[in-house]
Amino acid sequence: MPYFEAKLRVNLNDFAEIREKLDFCEKLSINYIIIEPIDYFKEISKDVKEKIEKLSNSNIYYRINLKTQNIKDFRKKIKKVSHVSDIISLETFNPNLQLIAARDSRVDLLSYTNFKLLNTLSEGVLSLANQNGKYIEFGIKSIMNESKQSQSKEFRILFKSIQMAMSRKVKFIISGNFKNKYDFRNPRALISIVNTLIDIPMPEVKRAFNRNVVSLIERSKNRTNPDIIEKGVKLISDGET
Amino acid sequence: MVRLKIRYERQRYILFKIIIEPSHVFNKNEFLNKLWSIIWDYYGMNTANKVGLWIHKLDLEHKYGIIQCSHKTKEIIISALSLIKRIKDKRVIFSPVITSGTIKKLKEKIPIYING
C-alpha cells in the first residue's frame, strides 16, 4: 500500500512554484500527494486540477482546508464546499467550533498540524470524532525545528496527543506539512522518525500514512456518490455484486 | 578447551539518494561526523553503541550512498539520515530509498532506483 504526503501546501496562482514542489517530490520518490491550496475556500475547478496533474506523474489528490475561528464564518464557508469530492478539513483554535465540526458530517478531517493547535485538542473532540467517523490529522513539521528545546516540547505534546487518539480508537493521519522544499522527506522516512523518536508502534504509524489516508479519500469521494444513502448503505443496481 | 559460539549479528544495507544545493561539496568524513552527531543528539549513547555503522559508498557524482548497520537499528539509521538538514551550513537531504539484507542484492537495484 502506498505512503502519502497528506499536506502539500501550494499557491494556486503560482504554477511555477507548484511545478518546483512536485518535481522535488518526484526526486524524493513521493508518489502519492494531497495538495492543499493556501487560503482557498471554494471548489477547485477541473481545469486547474488537470493543469496540476499534467505537471507531474505522481498521484495527486486535493483537500480544502477551512481556517476560521468563528462559527458563523465556518457555516458560510462549508456551504460553498459541501458538494465537492475533495477532502474537507478544518483548522481552528476555537474549542466550540472543533466540537461542532466533529459532529458535522460534511467535515472529513480535523487538522492539528502545529504545536499551538495541538494544545487545544480535547478528549471531547476525540470522542465525537470516533462516534462520527472523523479523522484527526497530526503534523510533524517540528522535526525540522532548529531549537532542540522547543523541539522536545513539541515532541512531548505530539506524543501525548497521539497516545490520546490511539486510546480513544480515533483514526488519525500524519502529514509532513513542510514549507521549504529542502524540508520535504519521503513518507517512509517520516514513519521511521515517528516510530523511533515519538515511540508510536510501527503498525499504527504505517496505518496513519497509508490505510487511513486511503479510507479518508474514499470517504470524501463517497460524499458525491448518489448511490450511497448513508454510511454502510449503498444502492446496488441489477446484476451488480 | 571450551569453545565459544558466537552468533553473528544480521546486517542491513541502506541505499540512499543525496539531494544537495548546486555546487555544494562535502566529503565522507563530514557526512559521517554529521550522522554520528545526529545519532548522539537524538538517541544517545545507549543506541549509538549498537548501530554498527559502516559507510560502503558515498558517490557525490551520481548522488547516492550505501550504509551498513545492524538489523535492529535500521529504523534509527533511516531516521538519522532523514534528520540531517545541513552540512557546512548548506541544505542537504539524504533520502533512504531501499533496504536489503545483502550488499549484492542492493547493488543490483542501484540502476533502478538511482539512475532509472
Image (cartoon, coloured by chain):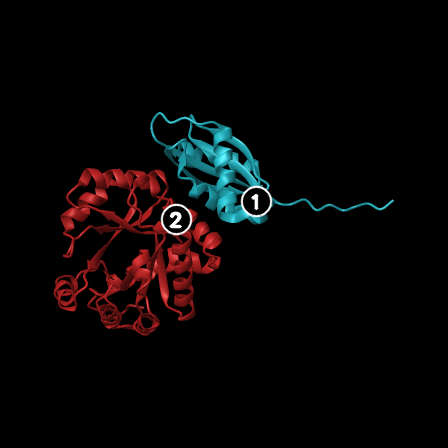
Spot occupied by residue A217 in the image (x, y as percentages of width and height): 29, 59
Residue at 45% over, 32% down: B64
Q: Which residue is mark 2?
A: A143
Q: Nearer the viewer, residue A230 or B67?
A: B67
Which chain is red in the picture?
A
Asked if badge 1 and badge 2 are on a common chain, one would say: no
C-alpha separation, residue under disc 1 versus residue under disc 2: 20 Å
Spot occupied by residue B25 in the image (x, y as percentages of width and height): 41, 26
**Total marks drawn?**
2
Q: Colour of chain B?
A: cyan
Chain at tag 2: A
**Residue kind at label 1, given as amino acid type:** Ala
Q: Nearer the viewer, residue B49 or A240?
A: B49
Query: Marks 2 and 1: in contact by CB < 8 Å?
Result: no
Q: Which residue is mark 1?
A: B48
Q: Nearer the viewer, residue A80 or B85?
A: B85
Spot occupied by residue A27 in the image (x, y as percentages of width and height): 35, 38
Which image quadrant is residue A117 in? bottom left
Query: Is residue B75 shown to the viewer in this render?
Result: no
Q: Is residue A28 left or right of residue A226?
A: right
